[in-house]
Image (spheres, coloured by chain):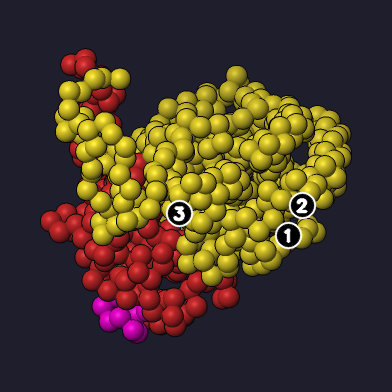
Amino acid sequence: MADNNAREEDHEGGPIADEPIADEVAAAIVEKFPGSIAADSHGQAVVYVDRAVLADVARFLRDEQEFTMCVDVSAVDHLLTGTRHRPPGVDPERFEIVVNFLSHPRNRRVRVICQVPATDLTVPSLTGVYVGTNFAERETFDLYGITFDGHPDLTRILMPDDWRGFPLRKDDAPGRVPVTFKGDPSPR
Amino acid sequence: MTHFDTEEERLERQTDEGKQELRHASRTREVVLTGGGMWPEDELGDTMIINMGPQHPSTHGVLRLMMELDGEDVLLIKPVIGYLHTGMEKTGEELTYVQGTTNVTRMDYASNFSNELVYSQAVEKLLDVDTQIPPRARWIRMMMCELGRMASHLLFQATNGMDMGAVSMLLYGWREREECLRLFEYVTGLRMNCNYIRPGGVVADLPDGWEDRVLEVCDVVEAGVRDYDEMLSQNPIWRERTVGIGVITTEECLERSITGPILRSTGFAWDLRKSQPSLPYDEVDFDVIYTSNGDVFDRYRIRLWEILESAKIVRQCVEKMPPGDFRVQDKKITPPPRARIDESMEALIHHFKLFTEGFKVPPGETYVTVESPRGEIGCYMVSDGSGKPVRMHIRGPSFYNLQSIDVMGTNSLVADAVAIVSSIDPIMGEVDR
């Protein structure tokens, strides 16, 4: 569709690489972790990092940038995404891990996103840096099947323990699985 | 209950839920088969693992707590959730942006306005209309959110009292909350799950005579709160049950992503309404309530006083409510007024298109937050230019607050565990989504 293509160009033509990064935290991450790409999403600071350094970025934010809280960890499945929003330079993969950080003393937020290919669904766990990401990572594992390396108790949290499949993946249709109850002898 | 010939067979057929471990592998022990005799003592002492819930009156819905007990002492607590998991985030990907608020309003069903607000603001940000929302819409949103906070905290006061054995509190809390719900019905048409705040504004203007109704509700609630304060705050039995129970520190709260009244009860005055306001909270006068002990009593006190602060904000809203539109006049996202549909073909087409296929949102991603009665509620939304979101994730404050029950509840008594669950004020619809 012509309309969509026009939009894609708009987004791909985003900030030029030489332009200074407006957000100081994003700039600090890019300086500390080469290869990271800073972007501005509707006025919010976003940094796209390599998934190998995700835990290091979190530690850097906590220890050196006063980011006191890791607010949220979640994931996105881009299997069926039509026009995908991404800043130039980011190599898109099927999954994205999205981590939101909040600094109380500085009263600001930063969002860190890393790409996860469908062939290797592992990212380092943040539980060693922020304990509070425990449940969130379990939920992401439960619903997307992404493994968090170093998580102390990576088990299903919302779905039943014997559930097969990962419901929030785009190729997991909600109506596909017939509803059964434990101990129900009916062959439904 | 099925009968099994041998213990091995029973263990083999045991459901997976029974195998979940409380401790790390090093502390688990092999199953001892007793052959019907006494259970042998082991080197860990006479501990016992019991399940509280998922159907337990004090667990606020369907929360299951696995507790390792030594007599009456709780050695470990592990919350087991998911019993109310209805796949609302998946449903959110199937619904258009117009329908989406119907879905999110059912997550935190005790304070639905915050959910609708955070969803609507995410959509507005992606549409880049967030700066064009008319002032009246923003003030109506603020007033309804504060009334929702009052209703939610009144529900907390009612159930918290009941959990501690002050059963009459249930009736009193419900009595005042009922007035709030009647007002919601008067304004939105529904008592709960109002679906009132929509992308672009609110669905309808306030009805005639709303000022008097709102002020009446404020009067009733404020009188009620003074009664609760008189009845409970200095009550020795109440203080015995709550003071010094379930203590948590600021550091633990921060590293465990705890927000809302629990964080404020540790002496950390953080409220998104003050620090990152998305509604005109900077134009009204109110205080952030915080205390320094971090126990069950402080969480009760904070929520009690927050009701009064919310009433203060609501009164100022009545005073300062600006005139004007109650939704953004953008024909792409706002349905035409009902009267226009009868006389204009275009209006009819707009209305039909909007409610069948919805509007399209340009590609992008955003995370917006609102201070709900339970803490920071966030909405992470990804759009791809179509009429439905690629991803609609709600960061539920109860979900994060509930996971730290082990910090608050370890080394307490079973009766305290009930008080601690109650003081977290979890809404399972939001925890499990």
x and y percent of residue B247 in the render? Answer: 60, 60
User: Looking at the image, is mark 3 or mark 1 nearer the viewer?
Assistant: 3
Q: Residues within 10 Å of mark 2 (few under 14, many from 20)?
A: many
Chain rendered red = A
Closer to the chain start, of discs 3 and 2, is 3
Q: CA distance from mark 3 to mark 1?
A: 32 Å
Q: Of helix, strand and loop, which one carries label 1?
A: loop
Task: Say if residue B25 shows up in the picture.
Answer: yes
Q: Amino acid at mark 2?
A: Trp
- Subunit of mark 3? B
In the image, residue B400 above or below residue B425: below
Residue type (three-letter) at the residue carrying disc 1: Ile
Q: Which residues are magenta?
A: A29-38
Determine whether label 2 and label 1 are within 8 Å by CB: yes
Q: Which mark is residue B66?
A: none
At x 63%, y 64%, the residue is B266
Q: Any magenta on residue A164? A: no
* Between discs 2 and 1, the one toward the N terminus: 1
In the picture, measured across the screen, residue B199 lies left or right of residue B175, that is: left
Which residue is disc 1 drawn over?
A: B289
Q: Position of residue B252 (x, y in %)?
A: 51, 66
- Colour in which the image shows chain B: yellow
